[in-house]
Structures are given as structure tokens and as C-alpha cells.
Image (cartoon, rainbow, N blue to C red):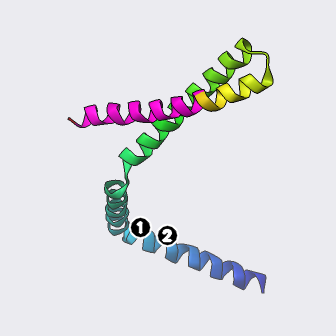
Amino acid sequence: MFPTVTLQIEGMRYHIVHALTTHHTEIEAEVNRQLEAMVKSFDFEKVIRAAVQDAITTAVRDHLKLAIGSAFGDPAIKSELQVMVLGAMRRLAKDDALEFFSQIER
């Protein structure tokens, strides 16, 4: 029983390798066509904008946390300042990013 299974597997392996070798050019052309279609339809600008916005927001938030944390000892004042300043910085960062990208498009 085992030799029969081994022969069948070897036979299947041979047929698969043969089919792939025979149709290599067709398979390669189809893979290239599919990849090109995917790259053309991918919205790189959207991904880049989101990454830039995230980086700006993170950098501003981290810097402000450090600055506010070391400047003010009262937790109530610190908390209120964080809310106010982070909100303002998010609006600024968003506006700056939009202005930056609009200048690039010109």
C-alpha cells in the first residue's frame, strides 16, 4: 500500500512540475498583469497622507506631554492644558499637512 501511495505522489509531483514548466511564460505574464493592476489602483497618496498626519500628531502629542509634564506640577492644570493644547495642535497639524500637500500638487 505505501509504495503505491509514494508512486502516486511522485507522479503527481512530476505532472505539477511539468505543467508549471510548460506554462511558465503564461503564468508569469498573468502574475505581472495582476500586479500592475493592483499597483495602478492602489491609493498611495491616501496612505502617505495618513502616515504623515499620524507622525505629526504623535510627535506633537509626545512633545507636549513631556513639556507640560515637566512644567506644571498640579494635575488639574496639567490635564486641562493637555486637552486645550493638544486640540489646538491637532487642528494646526491637520491644516499644516493639508497646506503642505496642496503646495506639492501645484
- Any magenta on residue 66? no
What residue lies at 39% left-to-right and 30% top-to-bottom?
A: 96
Q: Position of 39 compared to 8: left or right? A: left
Q: Circle 2 is placed at which residue position?
A: 17
Instruction: From the top left corner, tell me how far across and down residue 48 is, in percent.
Output: 42, 41
Count of numbered labels shown in the rendering: 2
Q: Is residue 38 above or below residue 16?
A: above
Question: Is the residue 9 above or below the residue 84 in the image?
Answer: below
Residue 73, image x, y percentages: 79, 16
- Quarter assignment of residue 97: top left
Disc 1 and disc 2 in contact, CB within 8 angstroms: yes
> Could you tell me which secondary element the residue under label 1 belongs to?
helix
Asked if residue 22 lies left or right of residue 13, the reply is left
Badge 2 element = helix
Residue at 33%, 69% in the rendered image = 26
- The residue closer to the viewer here, 43 or 5, is 43
Q: Amino acid at mark 1?
A: Thr
What is the number of the mark on residue 4?
none
User: What span is colored magenta in the figure?
Assistant: 85-105
- Residue sticking out furthest to the top: 71
Amino acid under disc 2: Val
Which residue, given by chain and number where applicable, does mark 1 sit on?
21
